[in-house]
Image: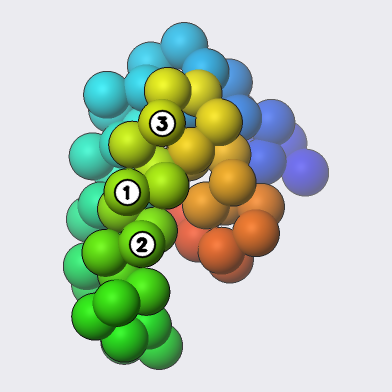
Amino acid sequence: MIKVVVEVLLAIFLHPIAFVLCVIDIVNRTDLSGAWKVLWIIISFFWGIGPILYVLLGRGKFW
């Protein structure tokens, strides 16, 4: 639970770092097709809410 709180705070206040961590995780995932990867990268670009959606709905992680 603490990890999720830290990820949400990171996504809100340090979005560029959270975006880079999301992109690294998205590119390295083997369970997503190319179209899903592009879609999640576009979604995670939106300030604050994008990385949070990726962590909560996309089963993603920052580390």
Which of the two residues, 38 or 20, is positioned nearer the viewer here? 38
Q: Is residue 30 left or right of residue 52?
A: left
Which circle marks residue 10 in the picture?
Answer: none
> Circle 2 sits on which residue?
39
Q: Is residue 8 left or right of residue 23?
A: right
> Circle 3 sits on which residue?
46
Kind of element beneath mark 3 = loop
Say whether marks 3 and 1 touch (CB < 8 Å).
Answer: no
Residue 15 in the image: state x and y as whole percent: 37, 22
Residue 55 in the image: state x and y as whole percent: 57, 51
Task: Decide if residue 35 is in sight here.
Answer: yes
What residue is at 42 percent from the left and 23 percent from the top? 47
Amino acid under disc 3: Phe
Residue 14 in the image: state x and y as whole percent: 38, 16
Which of the colour schemes (rainbow, by chain, secondary structure, one colour) is used?
A: rainbow
> Circle 1 sits on which residue?
42
What residue is at 28 percent from the left and 27 percent from the top? 17
Looking at the rendering, which quadrant does residue 1 occupy?
top right
Rendered view: 34 above or below 62: below
Residue 13 in the image: state x and y as whole percent: 47, 11
Amino acid under disc 1: Ile
Mark with earlier residue (3, 2): 2
